[in-house]
Image (cartoon, rainbow, N blue to C red):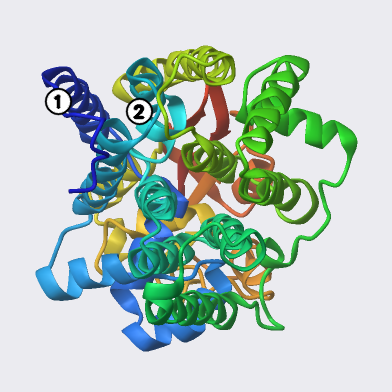
Amino acid sequence: MLMPLKNKLTWLDLGVFSGYVVAVSVAVAHHEPWADEAQAWLVARDVPFWKMIFRQMRYEDSPGLWHALLWVAQHGFHAPYSAMNWIGAALAAAGAGVLIFCAPFPRPVRYLMSFSYYVSYHYAVIARPYVMLLLFGGLAAIFYRRRSPISFAIAIALLCGTSVHGAILAAAISLGAGWHVVVKRDWEVGPLRTHYLTAVAIVIMAGIMVVVIVFPPADAGAEVARLFESAHLDRFLQLLGDTITEPWPIGGCLLLALAVFAVRSGESIVFLAGVGGLYAFEWLIFSLFQHWGAIVIALIVCLWIAWPRERKGSFEPTMAALLLSGLFAIQTVWAVSAWRHDFTTPYSGSKDAAIYLKQVGADHARIFGFCYPVVAVQAYFDRSIFADWPTAYSRGTKNEDSVICSMDCKTHYDYVVMPLLHGDDDPNAEAVEACGYVPVHISPGRAFFKQGVQITETFVIYRHIF
């Protein structure tokens, strides 16, 4: 069993886990996938497996484990598009189960963590590779604490496969393990030397595979090549507020206190390299709102590793538990707001747009799909319905935007599908209407983040009239 001996299963644990499953299931049943979710599904559907892993993943910024699971679901089990979010929810529930039943935190902390925003919504209802972070990060923490080298290495390899963020966390945990084995020598290696050498080989191979699969090619699009765009102090302070709690001074103080706790627990390398490394990555290299929760998952996993083994009423673990309870109580409020939003408001207008296009037979007409977000509409069809898209998925190359984000009036289309990404005003509306198109249908969608709408994924459908 994975469960620590002193952390006995209770009916309360089962009740909390059941409540988690119900809450996530209700939200999934009402969720409309947005473009980033659809992109992974379409890549897995339309690209041969090895070409997907060793070529397309270089444009996706992903080591490919999530895409591989979707590929197997479609090609092995003929799963429909609606299955994607249930697959993600099942992986998230597995991670929540590991947290609730196996983590060393006091029960109130575990329960609040499991119902927090990223654990129960953003990385559970929304089907992205990050749904696997808590599961494999939690397993890595368990085997780290148990000194089980091969099981630990397998968990680390799987964590590397989730995302670049998972690979950074995996590297931090591996550094911590290496510090104990090589420098502090407080892990007994002698009888298990072969196991440890095997574990080292597994971890190194996983790291090499991440670099080989993810390293971007020369023709990668701007999304992949965006470096050092957010390296400003105000951006870092915003990250503190968005990942921990707002306002940022409170979040910063909470993070500092938890860092001191981790350092004093003897796991400074794991915490500073894991949480600090992800903050540095999001601040200096590549920052998008959907990635920020990886820092919260890293915080949980790193504190999991650092938590004292002896359950004594000492001051430091008690204070850390109080801080974590306050932090994740706030994030649970965020989760409730997100569940309410997904239940009452379309997250993406893609499903409604696809229904309308099918009703009017537009999928058999000539349609122009304007820019990347329309992949969310493509996922509801068995082929690319847009004349300007050679594939149903976005290929992620540099010249793609110039083709799919500019429309020539000389070329005739029966319909145009235009996304509204930032509010209700379409900056391209006048140009489209000047080409002889009129709006005939609006499919509203609002991608929710924490306590408000981060982007608007509404689609306006135009028809050619002259």
Viewer-proximal residue among 457 and 49:
49
Q: Position of residue 443 (x, y in %)?
A: 40, 35
User: Does any portion of residue 40 appear in the rendered image?
Assistant: yes
Q: Is residue 457 left or right of residue 401?
A: left
In the drawing, does residue 55 fall left or right of residue 96? right
**In the drawing, does residue 243 fall left or right of residue 458?**
right
In this view, the residue in front, 281 or 397, is 281
Mark 2 → mark 1, Cα distance in angstroms: 13 Å
- Label 1: which secondary element: helix
Q: Residues within 10 Å of mark 1 (few under 14, many from 20)?
A: some
Which of the pair 74/370 is nearer the observer?
74
Give residue 442's quadrant in the image. top left
Q: State the SS at label 2.
A: helix
Q: In percent of the image, x 69 and y 21: which residue is there?
A: 251
Q: Residue at x 40, y 24 (%)?
A: 311
Tell me whether circle 2 and circle 1 mark residues in contact (CB < 8 Å): no
Q: Of discs 2 and 1, which sits in the foreground? A: 1
What residue is shown with label 1?
14
Q: Which residue is the site of mark 2?
A: 114
Q: Position of residue 112 (x, y in %)?
A: 39, 19
